[in-house]
Image: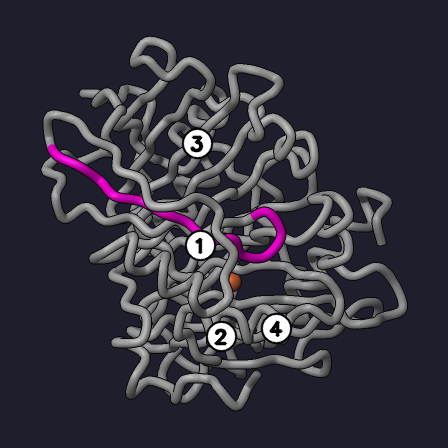
Amino acid sequence: MSATLEAPHSTQADSFPLRNLDHVHFYAGNAKQAAYFYRAAFGMTWTGYKGPETGSRDVVSYLLEQSRIRFLISSPLTPLHPMAEALRLHGDGVHDIAFEVDDAAASWSRAIERGAESAYGPQELTSAQGAVRMAAIKAYGDVIHSFVDRRSYQGALLPGYRAVESDTVARPTGLRHIDHMVGNVALGEMNRWVEFYQRVMGFSVFQSFDDKDISTEYSALMSKVMATGNGRIKFPINEPAPGRRKSQIDEYLEFHHGPGVQHIALSTGGIISTVARLAAQGVEFLRVPPEYYRQVWSRVGKIDEPAEELERLGILVDRDDEGYLLQIFTKPAGDRPTLFFEIIQRKGSRSFGKGNFKALFEAIEREQAARGNL
Ligand code: FE2
């Protein structure tokens, strides 16, 4: 199979053009309350609504936006809707990572030709503002990728949604766009999914980490970072590696009941003010021990941000050949120890904070131990 892979970069932009991430679609047990959390804590603004009042009898959806980040949060209104079964299995989490494309049907057909399985065929959603064309393929676990073509649509939202004019709950936090989204897959499955993204969607391997890079005393994982042809969207894929105890990936797979999206990294231009606001609004972050900051400055050298502020907020720093990055990770966003978020600010670095892996994973393991899952 690998002999048929596309050559990296030179042909990829043509091989499967993806304009950008269009939106991330979450399933939630109670979309109204989940939407409130993302508005009040993460600062998303409620901009669109679909439900019984708009003629949607079986599903309710909230569209939330902040700068270029677009979240769609849905709940089923009947127990027999397939969304209800997905929620029973996985709990709240990401169902669809949707891409904006020029031609949804063409993207879908090309993906199917290259061996992808269809999630739903080409369909057209129309309103007075025009038409949005969509189609989707299946990815790891029950995650799907929708292809969204908005070229014939003048509205800001999607057809079928009612615009929400003002949101008095939203408390913006300076989050700008999605930097990367990470998938967890089962032991031995990472390369299968890496190959899938290469073969079907023209991605290339941007970076890889083995269990020597990412291991603690107890557990290990392996990771490959996939990037789209235009390099704009990055998708690391993790699999557990054998360790002395249950790894964080194993815990995820157990509680999510299979592969799925592990974390979404949201980018900010000012991580200190963003994290301070998120924390004040109730977002819970993982903390590394104070010793981390006794070693980090000799490792990363001089940076623009005040060290004491970073330490006070628990923000991590890492440097590579191209520059540095600042990052921090939340605790799980819901009740199950599955999906969490990363807040990241890049100052030249395009990597993923390898220097922080050990401190970070030990922090995750302390949480796992507290849950009785280590
Ligand atoms: Fe990340």
Q: Which residues are magenta?
A: 130-142
For badge 1, the amino acid type reads Ile
Residue 102 in the image: above or below residue 72 = below
Label 3: which secondary element: strand
Disc 2: which residue: 318
Quarter of the view holding residue 332: top right
For badge 2, the amino acid type reads Asp
- Mark 1 vs mark 4, foreground winner is 4
Tell me if mark 3 has few (under 14), some (14-19) or many (20+) residues whose alpha carbon lies within 10 angstroms of its own: many
Q: Is residue 233 left or right of residue 137?
A: left
Query: Quick one: label 2 or label 1, which is nearer the N terminus?
Result: 2
Q: Is mark 2 within 8 Å of ligand 1?
A: no
Disc 1: which residue: 343
Disc 3: which residue: 73
Q: Which mark is residue 223?
A: 4
Say whether residue 104 is visible.
yes
Q: Is mark 3 within 8 Å of ligand 1?
A: no
Q: CA distance from mark 2 to mark 1?
A: 14 Å
